[in-house]
Amino acid sequence: MMLRETLILPVSVALLLAGCAKQAPTFPSDPLDQAATCGVIAAATEREAAGLKGDLSADAQARILHYAMLYASTGEAFDQDKLNAVSKRMPQLFDQTIKGKWKSLQSTCVVAFPASQIKQPALPPKPLDAMLQCDALAEFLRKALADQGSNYGEAANAYGLFIEKLDPKLSPALRAAGSGGADALRDRKLEALASASKLGQPPAVIDACEKKYS
């Protein structure tokens, strides 16, 4: 029960945060550019918090990616093409955003993407919906981190272990609900991933899932 889409994560950020220009960058009106801009702001924020050297944590990467996920979840089902569009757009907007007073846009991104600030998400009340969303999100993040190389292998494996623990509960529930064939299940999981993306910060959602199902 895997999502097979190819993921393009935002580029690794090497910031020179000192000496920023005095002018504040303009927040774009296009939804794609808004998601990409807020992804850049999130990357700058995470990098500043972590220091200028070394890899960002897996949770930090997920919080950056969340803006692209939210843009990809504006419809009923998760749209991989929209996710990739944000990831490709971020490097194009990077310089013009970070050279200005990028911190002035932090509050704007909070308003534009309120789900990005939810740190104590509530899982859906129906067990099957909750398990599907947990499974879809964990699988998505597992693949995302695995695609980033060995430095994120431990985190990717942890998501894989959670999926294995969840499967004995999820599989019988799917059979009882009559989930249909492979295509129907794939569509259902894309819908679940879109819903999970809107619950809150991905690491916080996974924490809630693990507390309930591990």
Image: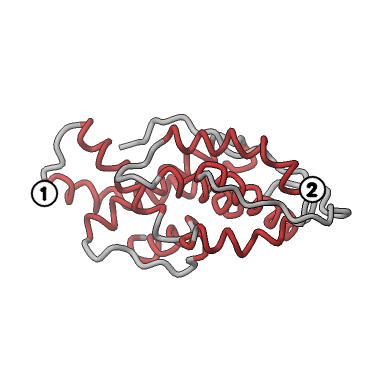
For label 2, the crowd category at 10 Å Cα-Cα, with few meaning under 14, some 14 to 19 and many 20 or more, is some
Task: Determine whether, in the image, residue 31 is placed left or right of residue 39.
Answer: left
Q: Hey, what amino acid is under mark 1?
A: Ala
| Callouts 2 and 1 close, C-beta under 8 Å | no
Q: What element carries label 2?
A: loop
Location of residue 199 in the rendering, given as x and y in whole percent from the top left corner: 39, 60
Q: What residue is disc 1 on?
A: 176
**Among the 4 quarters of the image, the one containing residue 210:** bottom left
Q: Hey, what amino acid is under mark 2?
A: Lys
Task: Determine whether, in the image, residue 85 is placed left or right of residue 171.
Answer: right
Decide which of 63, 160 is in the foreground and name it.
Answer: 63
Mark yes or no: residue 164 visible: no
Q: In this view, does 3 lie above or below 118?
A: above
Q: Which mark sits nearer the N-terminus, 2 or 1?
A: 2
Task: Determine whether, in the image, residue 198 is placed left or right of residue 203.
Answer: left
Total numbered badges shown on the rendered structure: 2
Location of residue 39 in the rendering, given as x and y in whole percent from the top left corner: 60, 48
Q: What residue is disc 2 on?
A: 99
Mark yes or no: residue 116 visible: yes
Question: Which residue is drawn at the image coordinates 41% and 43% (left, top)?
Answer: 139
Location of residue 200 in the rendering, given as x and y in whole percent from the top left corner: 45, 61
Label disc, if present, on residue 205 of the rendered structure: none
Q: Distance between the residues labelled 2 and 1?
A: 55 Å
Question: Which residue is drawn at the image coordinates 22% and 31% (left, top)?
Answer: 182
Location of residue 42 in the rendering, given as x and y in whole percent from the top left corner: 63, 54
Q: Is mark 1 on a helix, strand or loop?
A: helix
For label 1, the crowd category at 10 Å Cα-Cα, with few meaning under 14, some 14 to 19 and many 20 or more, is few
Q: Residue furthest right?
A: 19
Q: In which quarter of the image is the N terminus?
A: top left
Q: How is the image coloured?
A: secondary structure
Q: Is residue 43 above or below residue 153?
A: below
Decide which of 67, 54 is in the foreground and name it.
Answer: 67
